[in-house]
Image: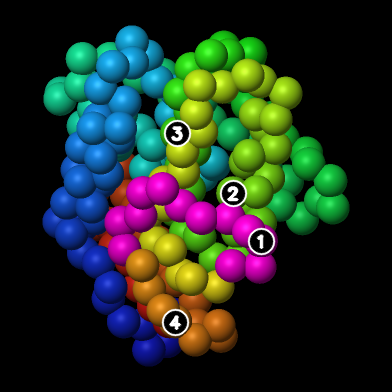
Amino acid sequence: MPDKILILNHQQIQQKIDRIAYQILEDNFEEKEIIVAGILSQGSVIAQRIITVLQSIAPFTCTLINIKLDKDSSTLQFSTDRDVAECSNKVVILVDDVLNSGKTLAYGFGVFLDVPLKKLRTVVLVDRNHKSFPVSTDYAGIALSTVIKQHVYVSLSESGDEDAVYLG
């Protein structure tokens, strides 16, 4: 990654995740259970970290669903590690690392089209503001106005100590 610029360090990423978790709690404090659906791979890591924070502050149960999308397909191709029917009449929080064109989140919405949900909310760590699809995010760690040629690199480690977001 030549000429990369550090946007968020590991401490700042954790602060963003903490803030997002509190926003989710405020928006869903009356719920008994919420589903946090992480888009593999980075979105699932962020989803798990949000659940970890929510488990310490929220009265409701959090369930993780991992979604694997074929982003190169012209039709919705996905798999999940749990039956999406488990989301019926529940709040679903769809999580990804970066919102760029909106295609990944649009595919993520498609996973739940045939399931009657209470509500569907979206979380991204970085919102780049280059949407090609009519997708917005409900909770974002940071919004960046970037040049379209630039790339956002999100690096997440298991321990969290080496987490970083770079612009390159």
Kind of residue at badge 3 = Ile
The numbered mark at residue 133 is 1
Say few, some or many: other residues with alpha carbon within 10 Å of mark 2 (under 14 / 14 to 19 / 20 or more). Answer: many
- Residue under the image location 25 percent in, 66 percent down: 8
Q: Alpha-carbon distance for marks 2 and 3?
A: 11 Å
Q: Alpha-carbon distance for marks 2 and 4?
A: 19 Å
- Residue under the image location 49 percent in, 76 percent down: 151
102 relative position to 128: left or right = right
Question: Of the residues under marks 2 and 3, which one precedes in the sequence?
Answer: 3
Q: Are marks 2 and 1 in contact (CB under 8 Å)?
A: yes
Kind of residue at badge 2 = Leu
Kind of residue at badge 1 = Phe
Question: Of the residues under marks 2 and 4, which one precedes in the sequence?
Answer: 2
Question: Of the residues under marks 1 and 4, which one precedes in the sequence?
Answer: 1
Q: Are marks 2 and 4 in contact (CB under 8 Å)?
A: no
Of labels 2 and 1, the one closer to you:
1
The residue that label 4 is drawn on is 146
Q: Nearer the viewer, residue 155 or 145?
A: 145
Q: Alpha-carbon distance for marks 3 and 4?
A: 26 Å
Q: Alpha-carbon distance for marks 1 and 3?
A: 19 Å
Q: Quadrant of the C terminus?
A: bottom left
Question: Of the residues under marks 2 and 1, which one precedes in the sequence?
Answer: 2
The quadrant in which residue 31 appears is top left
The residue that label 3 is drawn on is 93
Tag 4, which secondary structure?
loop
Question: Of the residues under marks 3 and 4, which one precedes in the sequence?
Answer: 3
Is residue 137 inside the magenta stretch? yes
Vertical placement of residue 137 versus 3, above or below: above
Q: Alpha-carbon distance for marks 1 and 4?
A: 17 Å
Say few, some or many: other residues with alpha carbon within 10 Å of mark 1 (under 14 / 14 to 19 / 20 or more). Answer: few
